[in-house]
Amino acid sequence: MTETNQVRIAILGLGTVGGGVYQLFQSQKDSLEAKTGLSAEIAAILVRDVKKPREGIAPSLLTDNFDDILHDETIDIIVEVMGGIEPARTYITEALHAGKNVVTANKDLMATHGGELLDLAQEVGRDLLFEASVAGGIPIIRPMKQCLAGNRITEVMGIVNGTTNYILTKMDDEGMEFSDALAKATELGYAEADPTADIEGYDAGRKLAILASIAFHSRVTFRDVYTEGISHITAADIRYVKDMGCVIKLVAIARETEKGIEASVQPMLLPADHPLASVKDVFNAVFVRGDAVGETMFYGRGAGRFPTASACMGDIIDVMRNIRFYCTGRIGCGCYRHVPIEPMKETVQRYFLRMQVADRPGVLAAIASVLGGVGVSIKQVVQKPTKAGQAELVLITDQVKEKDFLDALERFKSMTDMIQDISSLIRVHE
Ligand code: NAP
Ligand code: HSE
């Protein structure tokens, strides 16, 4: 802080989010003193390439040397919006050791190394806030850590990836195939040049790891989350699912049961009247169930320049208030216990199964018998002839332990005279 009590802020990264934070900060600057009791200024911005033209940014603010920021004792808050694990992890660690507070939007980092960084922040009595790391502009981390602190949270379920929600919406509303919907998402700038993390569920898995750790007060990392993407979903699946009164969404879901924490991201059938079924396009929503509050839902823009900057700016303002009252580090890591992770194969699920089968007597009975052998009953079944002697069989099962269902699938694979192809397998919510 300067001698005149002005908080000084450095931004690490000036891309989509960093540029948004800079612009939003400038537009909010004059009201900060009224909101927090302190004034503030942006003192430095770290980028890779200082020569790149940056509209509206004074070149004197830019540096490509983190040490310029680290060793500047007047800088109180570092806003890390570079992304990736390194050097972000090292920079945040060094910044906390140097007594600086940190705001970050980095889900990759927090989902893997959040525990160690939060412990360090607590040890040095500084804030490490990360509201923007999950669901962009939607307030969810602070509500869970603070407003819902009086609850035992039993379930967190959400649509936390905008790109995949856009793709599935296009497939559902316009009958597009996955590849065409992905091309449209890329054209509109929603999907990144390499969309793997979005479409394979890794981005949602990282966000779920962060949410589950907060919800259950036990550290869940990205490696603990089962992830499955949406690239195998076809327009044919969507048509059948629609006829059955459901939609397919990429659902991130974490529950605490008597056996431990279940955490998974997968495409899932939701009834059309489920609150998450009407979350469309790039919007996100998170559904939280607490023992006292019951069901709550948070909805809004999960990504983008200003929605994400909005979350970072909220964190900056919170840190400024804490600086003013000498209480940084007030809300640290909430993981005070260890709950085991329940492996996916031990969880209980329902399934949507689409198969190409021989169209002759006894086939359906044989399939039902294999499922019956693992204790599964069929809830719903549709059979449509496709070509001579063949039919498409679509069924929805009752609840079954995943490992038992996988055993039944292995049996199906050996029934080659009856089952030509298992075209789709999608989990069904409850
Ligand atoms: P981006 O557009 O790629 O911007 C990254 C910025 O960081 C660039 O300005 C880049 O510098 C700088 N940078 C990267 N590595 C650096 C290094 N080693 N040293 C110095 N500067 C470096 O990324 P973004 O979309 O803004 O995302 C930033 C973070 O926010 C990520 O953690 C992301 O997961 C998170 N986030 C993003 C969104 C979103 O909607 N985009 C939403 C929520 C959270 P140059 O300009 O010189 O290349
Ligand atoms: N790629 C993410 C999404 C945005 O599509 O939701 C960054 O969190």
Image (spheres, grey):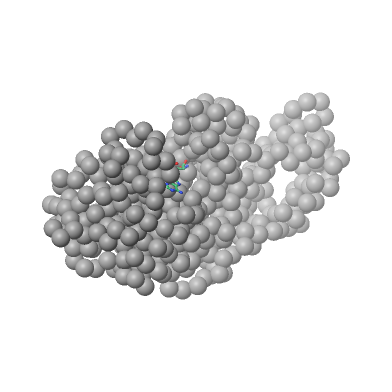
Residue at the image point whose x is 42% and y is 41% from the top = 49
Q: Position of residue 46 (x, y in %)?
A: 37, 48
Left or right: residue 95 compared with residue 321: right
Could you tell me if residue 135 is visible in this image? no
Residue 299 x, y percent position in the rendering: 37, 45
The residue located at (36%, 73%) in the rendering is: 123
Instruction: Left or right? Give the position of 219 relative to 428.
Output: left
Comparing 363 with 354, the one in front is 354
Residue for point 55% across, 49% down: 202
Where, by quadrant of the figure, is residue 28 drawn?
top left
For the N terminus, give its image quadrant. bottom left
Which residue appears at 75% of the width and 36% of the height? 356
- Using the image, determine if residue 41 lies above or below residue 146: above
Residue 97 location, x and y as percent?
Answer: 37, 67
Residue found at the far right of this picture:
417
Q: Quadrant of ligand 1?
A: top left
Q: Is residue 245 left or right of residue 59?
A: right
Q: Return the residue nearer the eye: 353 or 311.
A: 311
Image quadrant assignment for residue 365: top right
Q: Is residue 413 visible?
A: yes
Up/down of 356 relative to 206, above or below: above
Residue 375 image offset from top left, x and y in percent? 70, 58
Task: Judge whether 231 appears above or below 39 on screen.
Answer: above
Q: How many marks?
A: 0
Work out whether residue 52 or residue 221 is closer to the camera in this orientation and state it.
52
